[in-house]
Amino acid sequence: MDKKEDVYRTVTKPSPEILYKDRKSKFYAAVYPIATEDDVKPIVEELRKKHHTANHVCYAWQLGTDNPVYRANDDGEPNNSAGMPIYGQIQSFDVTNVLITVTRIFGGTKLGVGGLIQAYKTAAQMALESAQIVQKTLKAELHLKFEYPMMDLVMRTIKQKDLDMVSQKMELDCELVVAVRLSESEETFQLFDEMHGVDVKMTV
């Protein structure tokens, strides 16, 4: 794995809610960070309460980096006229672990399928443009167990490799958990594995 493959783009906090108007219909859009599919429903329910006159709360989300999973929901709009245009913007901005919602309040004029696709796409794009997109690195965790005399060597290696300390328990038997970027995890695992007296396990 090279270094390009262990970074991804996401948001760490919800974006401001933006408003896009088309022929008196109002489209309120926002981007949210999500960690699991279970995060989606409470956000959508909250939006239904907030915009209680809304006809549709359409959305799309994506989770994961290697084999991402996604869903697109039209919430009663014509098939593929809302959820998929929103999802298209997730792909276009190359973000993951995000939910984008677009809440529509009907203005009395039908937009037609083409008009809807354009409106949902534009609203999702505007929300992503207002979001703070950050780059994150995928990491693996190394669980190290060793006796106290090995401490110096282990700590020196952690410092040299610039590893993040996740947790530590320093007693007669020491236990450390360190985080290492995924592209360097095999090589770092090898390093500790070759140290006599150090037991190492990796979790991704």
Image (tube, rainbow, N blue to C red):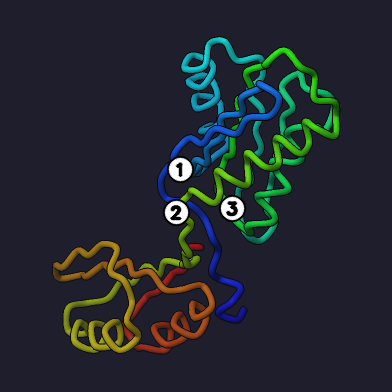
Q: Nearer the viewer, mark 1 or mark 3?
A: 1
Q: Nearer the viewer, residue 153 or 114?
A: 114
- Give x and y (percent) for residue 169: 19, 63
- Of the residues shown, which amino acid type is indicated by label 3? Thr
Q: Nearer the viewer, mark 2 or mark 3?
A: 2
Q: Residue at x 66, y 19 (%)?
A: 56
Q: Earlier in the sequence, mark 1 or mark 3?
A: 1
The image's mark for residue 15 is 1
Q: Are marks 1 and 2 in contact (CB under 8 Å)?
A: yes
Q: Which residue is the site of mark 2?
A: 132
Label 3: few (<14), some or many (≥20) within 10 Å? many
Q: Residue at x 34, y 70 (%)?
A: 178
Name the element at disc 3.
loop
Q: Nearer the viewer, residue 154 or 132?
A: 132
Q: Residue at x 69, y 41 (%)?
A: 86
Name the element at disc 2.
loop
Q: Earlier in the sequence, mark 1 or mark 2?
A: 1
Q: Earlier in the sequence, mark 2 or mark 3?
A: 3
Name the element at disc 1.
loop
- Of the residues shown, which amino acid type is indicated by label 2? Gln
The image's mark for residue 45 is none
Q: Quadrant of the N terminus?
A: bottom right
- Give x and y (percent) for residue 196: 35, 88
Q: Which residue is the site of mark 3?
A: 96
